[in-house]
Amino acid sequence: MSDDEREDLEHIVVEYYTQHLNHLSTEILELLKDLSKEFGVAIIVITHNLGIVARYADRVNIMYAGRLIERGTCKEIYHNPRHPYTIGLMHSVPRLDQPRKTRLDPIEGQPPEMIDLKPICSFLDRCKFAIDRCSNEVPPLREVEEGHLSACWVAEELGDSEKP
Ligand code: SF4
């Protein structure tokens, strides 16, 4: 990479497909982290792997059915999620900060057909917190705490007992 190209670099996008962290992927991610510090660029990692998110991310964007549904710091997303899909994700994967025998709870149901998205909340069919409004309007992404955004009508009411 030339010096000019380095100066123009604003961010690097990495797509991480596999569910498991292995030696090689850890090395690559560590290398990218070093590059990010050295050149002052952001690294955007697209992944389903919550282990990578917990280990490398400062800020997290959660997508569902092609839309951004929650945005926050890594700490907010893991310890104070404000969208039922994010809460479901946190309950469905093993976590090192929980006892080994903690029961995993997969998210029931399927995502909606992307070619036939209706003007309602896309998570409605899988959501146990739904209210009438969810089947009439698409919830906009809005701030529920400083810098923490959620696209859910009941984001403020999601109780601590539901959180991971
Ligand atoms: S807007 Fe309604 S259906 Fe959608 S995630 Fe929130 S509570 Fe569930």
Image (cartoon, rainbow, N blue to C red):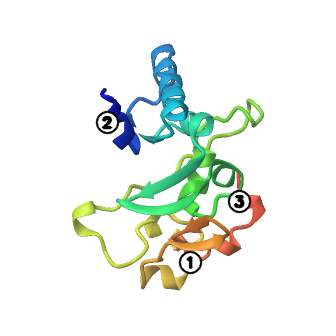
Mark 3 burial class by Cα count in 10 Å: few <14, some 14-19, many 20+: few
State which quadrant residue 98 falls in. Answer: top right
Vertical order, 41 against 83 (above or below): above
Residue 108 in view here: no
**Disc 3 versus disc 1: distance between alpha carbons?**
16 Å
Tag on residue 153?
Answer: 1
Q: To which residue does mark 3 refer?
A: 162
Of marks 3 and 1, the one in the foreground = 1
In the image: residue 61, left or right of residue 91: left
Decide if ligand 1 comes within 8 Å of the CB at mark 1: yes
Disc 3, ligand 1: is the CB inside 8 Å? no
Q: Label 3 to label 2, Cα distance in Å?
A: 50 Å
Residue 95: percent from the left, percent from the top?
Answer: 67, 35
Image quadrant in which you'd find residue 113: bottom left
Q: Can you give x and y, in whole percent of width and height, for residue 93 in the image?
A: 59, 39
* Nearer to me, 25 or 120: 25
Q: Provide the residue designation for mark 2.
A: 4
Mark 2: few/some/many CA within 10 Å (<14, 14-19, 20+): few
Give the residue drawn at x 50%, y 34%. 36
Residue type beneath disc 1: Trp
- In the picture shown, does residue 134 fall above or below 6? below
**Label 2 beta carbon less than 8 Å to ligand 1:** no
The front one of 154 and 109 is 154
The reply to whether residue 89 is in sight is yes
Q: Amino acid at mark 3?
A: Glu
Q: Which label sits in the foreground, 3 or 2? A: 2
50 to the left or right of 5: right
Report the residue at 42% width, 85% height from top: 136
Which structural element holds mark 3? helix
When the figure is inspected, residue 45 is found, relative to residue 115, above or below; the finding is: above
Q: Residue at x 42, y 78 (%)?
A: 138
